[in-house]
Image (tube, rainbow, N blue to C red):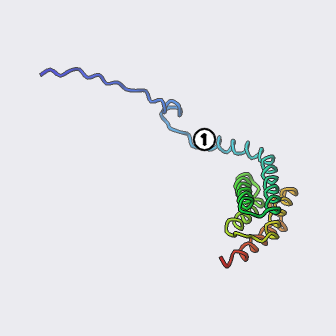
Amino acid sequence: MIRPAIELIVQPNLLKAKTGGGGGIDIATALRRAESALEDIRDSFAGWAAEDVTNLASAYAAFAVAPGAKSHAALGRAAIDLKGQAATFGYPLIARVAASLARLLDESIAPPSTLVEAHVSAVLAIHRDGETGTPLAEALAQELEDRVAETLEPF
């Protein structure tokens, strides 16, 4: 019995070529590139932070005038956005206060307006003064977190 000749076709490994050959991905180089990209973005965050703080203030103004479900949700979204951005780009106190506000808004249907206002005012002051961890700013953040915990305790 005669067997037909077999032709073996080997496809080029394009992924291997794109990643630099047979050695795989250089983790150290990839990490340096990622850190560099994050630093570039971090430098731009000052402008983004100002915009997010302005969005929070605007959302609060709408909430203060008409504290309904729509304005409540918009203020909560603004707080969550600010919390995430600030934490990523080196504004830990703004992130902390925004997280406290987001928790208050998420877990309370009718949060005390004075406590909401205190959070927004704290974010504005921390941003204006460029606070990054002074004892006074830390104490303010802790006090706001404590008031939120007391407010939500029955729930």
Coordinates of residue 49 in the picture (x, y in percent): 79, 51
Q: Is residue 80 visible?
A: yes
Q: Which residue is mark 1?
A: 30
Q: Residue furthest right?
A: 129
Residue situated in front as seen by the camera: 83 or 118: 118
Return the x and y of residue 82 as percentages of the image width and height. 74, 55
**Is residue 76 or residue 80 the one in the foreground?**
76
Horizontally, residue 50 falls left or right of residue 35, namely: right
Indicate the quadrant where residue 39 lies: top right
Mark 1: which secondary structure?
helix
Task: Decide: few, some or many residues near mark 1? Use Cα within 10 Å; few <14, some 14-19, many ≥20.
Answer: few
**3 to the left or right of 97:** left
User: Which residue is rendered at x = 74% and y = 63% of the image?
Assistant: 68
User: Residue 56's spot in the image, x, y percent?
Assistant: 79, 56
Q: Position of residue 35 (x, y in %)?
A: 67, 45
**Mark 1: which amino acid?**
Ala
Residue 139 appears anywhere in the view: no
